[in-house]
Image (spheres, helix red, strand yellow):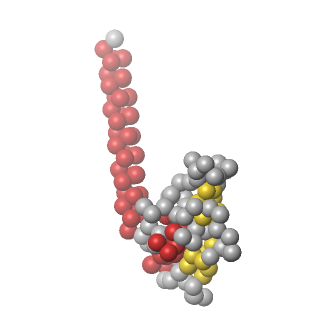
Amino acid sequence: YTTRTICPLENEENIAYAVRYFNLEVVPQGPFHVGGVGLASSSLSEEDQHLVQRFNPADANVDASGFFIAKLRKKASLPRPIGMLTDPGVEELKQKEMTEARNAEASISDDDEEAENNNDHQ
């Protein structure tokens, strides 16, 4: 798994999700580990943080715009049941985003109505 970003949601959190819900494990990438470790503030285990590679452009030794590498291996031949793929945090996030979108739409509608009322009074 690779990305050209340093965004933890696209990197460590995607790997932690894959490990948790798709019965995968993070494995060593070979004899060389030239990148930095995964973020300690992520959902990855401490062991998995040391198996991924993070190339942060803010590091003086990194000549890259940002890069992330993780090697995954399936732990078993059968996937978990479909019901196991639902993460409660994802549902909460979807609900929050939908509420924010509705609030934004309501605010736009209120602004449109106010503008219409102002036009009626002119």
Query: Above or below — where is 17 with respect to 102?
Result: below
x and y percent of residue 8 in the render?
A: 50, 57
Query: Above or below — where is 107 with respect to 100?
Result: above
x and y percent of residue 24 in the render?
A: 56, 79
Q: Is residue 26 left or right of residue 114?
A: right
Say if residue 26 shows up in the picture.
yes
Work out whether residue 19 or residue 120 is closer to the camera in this orientation and state it.
19
Outermost residue to the front: 61
Q: Is residue 106 left or right of residue 82?
A: left
Work out whether residue 36 or residue 5 is closer to the camera in this orientation and state it.
36
How many labels were placed on the picture? 0
Seen at 60% across and 88% down, the residue is 77
User: Residue 93 occupies which quadrant of the picture?
Assistant: bottom left
Seen at 60% across and 64% down, the residue is 53
Seen at 36% across and 17% down, the residue is 119
Q: Quadrant of the N terminus?
A: bottom right
User: Residue 11 occupies which quadrant of the picture?
Assistant: bottom right
Q: Is residue 29 left or right of residue 84?
A: right
